Image (cartoon, grey):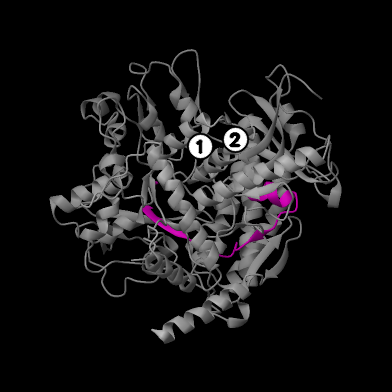
Amino acid sequence: MIELVSDSRCIGCNMCVKVCPTNVFDKTEYVPVIARQEDCQTCFICEAYCPVDALYVSPYADEAIEVDELLLANEDVLGSWRKTIGWGPGRVKIASIDQTPFINRILPEKVLKARGISDVDSPFGR
Amino acid sequence: MSNENIKYYTADVLVIGGGPAGAWAAWSAAQTGAKVILVDKGYLGSSGATAPGGTNLLYLPPDQVLRDTAVDLRMNSGGFLSEPDWIYRVLDQVYINLDRIEQWGYPFVRDEKGDAQRNHLHGPEYMALMRKQVKKAGVTVLDHAPALELLVDEHGVGGARGVLRQQNKEWEIKAGAVVIATGGCAFLSKGLGCNVLTGDGYLMGAEVGAELSGMEFSRQYAPSAAYSSPTRGRLLGWATYYDEDGNELGGDRGGDFLAKRLLNGGSVYAMMNKADTPEKQAILRSAHSIFFLPYDRAGINVFTDMFPLTLRYEGTVRGTGGLRIVTDDCGTTVPGLYAAGDAATRERITGAASGGGAFNASWAICSGTWSGEGAANYAKKAASTFGGRTLQRAGKYGLKAESTTQAVQNEAEPIISKREPTDSKGTATASNVAESDVVIKELVKAIQNEILPLEKNYFRSETGVQESLDILHELWPKVQQQKVESIHDVVHAREAAAMAATARWIYTAALARKETRGKGLHTFAEYPEQDPNQHHRIIVSGLEKIQVSYDTSFIDKVEKYQELHKKEVQTK
C-alpha cells in the first residue's frame, strides 16, 4: 500500500491525485495527502507517474507498515519503479527492450500448468 | 432540479470505462466524426487490469496455417462454445490495430530477423499511449467520474449519470448510444490493477434489462506473493515449489496443485531456481518486471530464496462471462447499449476457457473498436429518429441519494440531487428501504466470504454453491441499506451492490451447468464430465429474481466447423 508522500521531494503537481485509479490521495494546499489508504490496490502506478520520486508504495497489500524515508532514499528505493520501466528523461523505456516475446526460448523442461489458474498463455497454450 | 452541483453534457457516444476496451471504443467512435465522451472511475491510462503490468496478445501474422491452428486449439479447449468466425475476425482486427499502435510510436522490440514482436504490450506504456491518442482524436475525457446508472426511455439507453468524485459534483450525459467498458468483476481481491473492477457495468446493464452470458465460467484464480498484488503466473514456470520446511513438493504438480496446497489456510512456497543463469534471470526481469517488484522491496531474492504464494480471485476478469452481445458490433439486447472488453462475455472467442493473458487483451482491442463504431452509427440514426427524449434514471440498487445528501452535510449544497423512489417491479421503494445501518465494508466482506474462498468457488460442489447462493440472496436486500457518509461511500455502496449481484449471477449460472466443460473454468465435484446435452450457453438476467435461459444460436456454426474439420483431417 502507499505509505509515503515525501514532503521534501513533492512539488505539488498533484499527478498522483490525478492518476491513482482508486482515488487514494486528496489534494491539499500543499502536498497531497494519503486520504484513503485502505482503498490502495498496490498497483504502483502512482510511483511511475511521480516526476520527482516522492512516493513509496510498500509491497504489502494487506497491511500498513512504518517506513523510513531516509533509508528508502539512501537505498535508491524511491523512484526505483519509474527507473525500472524507463520513464523519465534520458532513460530507455522497458517496452523497447521487453524480452517477453522471447521468454519461451529459456523455458525449463517441466512447467507447471494448473487448471483454472491464471497464466499468460501464448495463443497455442504452452 | 438543475443546479450548479450537476454538470450536464451531451454526446453522440458515451463510453463508460477507460481501460483498453474503453479507450479503443472511444477512439473508434471518434473516427466516424461522432462527438464522444469517455468517463472513467479512475484515470484513463492507469485504470484496470492492463495498465500497471502488461499483457500478452492473441496476435498472429496473416498466415493461414498458424491462424487455423490457433482457432482449432481454442475451439477444443473452449468446449466448443466459441465461434470460429469470431476468432478469425479478432485475429484480423487485432493485426490492424497493433500496426496502428506501432505507427503511433509504441516501441515494439524486434527479433533477429527484424520483425516487430507485437504479441506483448507493456501496461503503463500502452495505456499512456492510448490516452494520448484518444484525446488527440477529440474525445472528451472525464477522469474520476464513476458512472452510477444509465438513463433510459422507450427507445432504449440514452446516457448515464454519475459523480465527479474529486469535485463533489454529479454529472449527467445524454448520448445517442452508450458503450459499457467497465471491465469484469474481481471482488476487490487485490490482484494487480483489479480493484476498480467491481462489476459496475453488469449492474447498470442488468438494470435496463441486458442479459449476461457465461457467468459460470469464473472459477479463476491467479498466484501472487502471499503479501502482495502482482499476479504474473507465467514466471512461476521457472519455480520449484516447497512446503514451509523447505521440502520440495514433488509428485503431481499439474491440475489443482496450488489450490490444494492453499486450501483452508495451507501454504506453499516457490523459488525461481530454474532460471539458473544470470542471463536467464535478466531476461525474466525485463519481461515481467512488475513480478519482481514486491520481492525486491521485501528483500527477497526470488532466484535463491523461498517466497510464500497465495491465489487471488480474478472472477470474470480472467473468467469469460459478461454482458451478452448479440450483434457483430457488440450490441447488447438493449437498444443503444453496447459492451466491450471484460464487461462483455468473451465466450464467442474463448468459449469455456479463460481468455486471461492473451485472448482477453485482443478481445478488448477488437470489441472496443467494433462497439465504438457500432455505437456511433446507432447514435446517428437515433439522433434523426428519436427526437427529444425524456430520459429516466435506471439505477435501483445501492444508490440511496437521500442518505447521501444528508451524509454530506458539511457541504453547503447537497451533492446528490434527491431521487424519486422507483416502484417498478417492487424495488427500491421508499417503503421497503429499511434503515441505512449496513456498513459497506462489512457487506463487502460478507459477499467476499462466499465468492473468494477456494473451498467454495475453486473446488465447486453443487451443494456448496447452492449454500453460498442462498446466503448471497439473503444479503441482497442489504445493498439498499448501506450507510453512506461521503461521495466515496456513494461509489463504494454502488460497487457493493454490483458485486452482490455479480456473485449471485455467477452461482446461479454455475448451478445451471451440471457438468464440467472446457478448461476447468467451471466444474462441479458431482459432475466431473462434459455432458453433450449441455452444449449451450447459459444466460442469466434480472436482479430481484434471476432468470436462467439457454442459448444455442451458435451451434449450427460449430457443427459446420466440426464437420469441415473432420473432412480436412480425413483428406490429410
> Quadrant where the N terminus of chain B lies?
top right
Q: Does any portion of residue A59 appear in the rendered image?
A: yes
Residue in the image at 61% along x and 40% along y: B16
The dot on residue B224 is none
Q: Provide the residue designation for mark 2.
A: B38
Residue range (magenta) = B202-229
Label 1 is placed on what type of residue? Asp
Q: Provide the residue designation for mark 1.
A: A39
Query: Observer-nearest residue: A39 or A17?
Result: A17
In the image, residue B97 lies at what x, y percent? 46, 47
* Element type where label 1 sits in the image: helix
Q: Is residue B298 above or below residue A28?
A: below
In the image, residue B245 lies at what x, y percent? 24, 61
Label 2 is placed on what type of residue? Leu
Left or right side of B277 for B144 = right
Q: Does any portion of residue B244 appear in the rendered image?
A: no
Chain under disc 1 = A
Real-space Cα separation, disc 1 to disc 2, in angstroms: 23 Å
Mark 2 closeness class: few <14, some 14–19, many ≥20 residues within 10 Å: many
Left or right side of B217 for A75 = left
Residue in the image at 58% along x and 59% along y: B321
In the image, residue A37 lies at what x, y percent? 47, 33
* Element type where label 2 sits in the image: strand
Chain under disc 2 = B
Viewer-nearest of discs 1 and 2 = 2
Q: Is residue B480 above or below residue B331?
A: above
Is-magenta flag for residue B210? yes
Mark 1 closeness class: few <14, some 14–19, many ≥20 residues within 10 Å: some
> Quadrant where the C terminus of chain B lies?
bottom left
In the image, residue B171 lies at what x, y percent? 68, 29
Left or right side of B195 for B163 = right
